[in-house]
Image (tube, grey):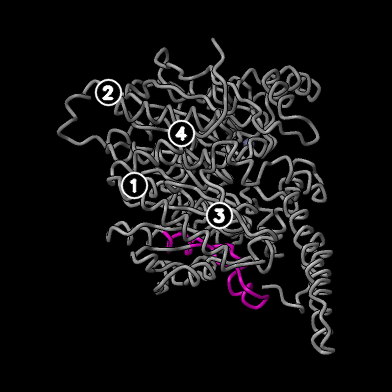
Amino acid sequence: MSLFDWFANRRKSEPISQERHEREIADGLWSKCSECGVLTYTKDLGANLMVCPECGFHNRVFSDERIRQLIDTNTWRSLDDHLNPQDPLEFRDRKSYTDRIRDTQTKTGLLDAVATGVGALAGLPVALGVMDFRFMGGSMGSVVGEKLTRMIERGTGDRRPVIIVCASGGARMQEGMLSLMQMAKISGALERHREAGLLYMPILTHPTTGGVTASFAMLGDVIIAEPKATIGFAGRRVVEQTLREKLPDDFQTSEYLLSHGFVDVIVPRTQLKKTLAQLIQLHQPLRHAEHHTAAMQVPDAFPLPTVTAD
Amino acid sequence: MSKPERRPLLDFERPLTELELRIVQIRDLADENEVDVSDEIQKLEARAAQLRQDIFQNLTPAQQLQVARHPRRPSTLDYIQAMTDEWIELHGDRATGIDDKALVGGVARLGGRPVVMLGHQKGRDTKDNVARNFGMASPGGYRKAMRLMNHANRFGMPIITFTDTPGAYAGVEAERLGQGEAIAYNLREMFRLEVPILSTVIGEGGSGGALGIGVGDRLMMFEHSVYTVASPEACAAILWKDAAKSPQAAEALKITAADLKRLGILDEILPEPIGGAHSDPLATAATLKAAILKNLETLDQLTGPQLKQMRYDKFRKIGMFSEVSA
Ligand SMILES: [Zn+2]
């Protein structure tokens, strides 16, 4: 019996009245999958890393939770969490950028769209950046560029592998060309990290598009994608308008990129930490391996049964 | 340079082109009738000069964008032809199986020295524009550019790049062939090269498609060129939910050379003839050539590792943020 079946059977064995369901969804006790509609006990969903046990749908997770999922307890040291966006262009569309920043900060409790830091992943030291889609669609402005660059530089200095969890609509238009130039800045830092012989792995999550795709998302030594994420350079609608034709259903998905050779491997979130640890260890030259023997004992950070991809 | 048959292509150019046309007509009439109208002509020409200055010194960002996209604005190949003593175009990325005509490059002799030149290429007319895909390069174009830059690095030749694109091509084929990866790869690899890289926005610098050949030691822009994170049309559609707000977006996005100099992105503004580059392409090419040679002279003093360090530092400091105390 697959785990999906197991979860499904368990749910079926607990008949719950309709109104109680609705009340408990509202209470947040149960979560309804936006993909398959099946209800999952919210605690179970969280324990399954927000992946629907029924259909494998990957619900969005934000930076704090993603860090908890990947980094060993009590090993995370966040970097540069005091960087605050400015409004260098005094940009105003229907709303001023200054107001937009303030409102988004109040709503999300975040200063900008990326969390960076260093920590241990299954005992292995890493430098990690996690983009946060809640903050203006994970758009990349000066703060995102600066924090990622500092994190990569730190990774180079400490000789740590760098991992960036991508989730972004692209450049932050409200910062104009300053935003575009962050693509070059981060790529430059990655070149130095690479030159130092170190491993870089971007994780492409839904959605990874625009300027992020045209820079650090595609520069990994190993490029990992979560299942069924949207990944592309130009927006689907833009492409549709350019061609005035219907696009294939799987266009710009993780699976599409995998089959066209732009993603190395699709890894379900429930396997991500384990796979990253395995990849990091596979890239440690043997002659250095004895320094990392402690790291070989991967602690079982997630005691839950693992869900298989199929 | 102005020819009587020249139609005004931009609305704000109309009074000027009409006046220029009248001058030519009067001169022709005077010639036919052997009348001396030199005083009259002189006055009209002074007025035209004043008008040209008035128009081109007070362009709004949206108008700058129109000048930058002017169908007669000199293109990459126009500049290469006007500036170089020798030029051999080199084709292909050796991988995709298609030579991208929207991004051209090759080896040249400039001021006596061998260089690699490459840039986006818009068409000179509608038919040419279709062949050139309106200067929107495909992954194969960016990979050709990288191949040529590696070539330059191997033979110690400076790299001179020209930016003139509305953006990288957004099509199914481009996505399938990895448009994002192609640009990303160039961004990283340009930091690895140990030869001087000079980038100039000669017309329109459209987003990632522009930056994909634009990681230079020095960034120059012509006075009326623009460089944008997203086209004002796209930005208006997304942020204003109204594509007709594109003039406001052009204003808000800070896309002009003067703005980008202020923001610390641009190193040097190259002056254009009054009336724009298209009013005197040869003079404009001379300006560009002089600026390139002057900068190369400075960059020649640096070793490969010094160039890399300088390039890194240049981009490293771009961005504006504050550091709040925890
Ligand atoms: Zn589901």
Residue A254's x, y, as percent?
52, 48
Q: Are marks 3 and 1 in contact (CB under 8 Å)?
A: no
> From which residue to which does the magenta span run?
B119-145
- Say if the magenta span includes residue B124: yes
Q: Are marks 3 and 4 in contact (CB under 8 Å)?
A: no
Q: Nearer the viewer, mark 4 or mark 2?
A: 4
Q: Are marks 3 and 2 on the same chain?
A: no
Q: Is mark 3 within 8 Å of ligand 1?
A: no
Residue, far top: B326
Q: Which mark is residue A164?
A: 4
Q: Are marks 1 and 4 in contact (CB under 8 Å)?
A: no
Residue A160's x, y, as percent?
32, 28
Q: Are marks 3 and 4 on the same chain?
A: no
Decide: few, some or many residues near mark 1? Use Cα within 10 Å; few <14, some 14-19, many ≥20: many
Separation of marks 3 and 2 at Cα, in angstroms = 50 Å
Q: Provide the chain ID for the residue under circle 3.
A: B
Q: Which residue is mark 3?
A: B201
Residue A274 in which image quadrant: top left
Q: Which residue is mark 1?
A: B192
Question: What's the residue type where badge 4 is placed?
Answer: Ile
Question: What's the residue type where badge 2 is placed?
Answer: Ala
Helix, strand or loop status at disc 3: strand
Residue B94 can be seen in this image: no
Decide: few, some or many residues near mark 2? Use Cα within 10 Å; few <14, some 14-19, many ≥20: some
Which one is earlier in the sequence, the residue at label 4 or at label 2?
4
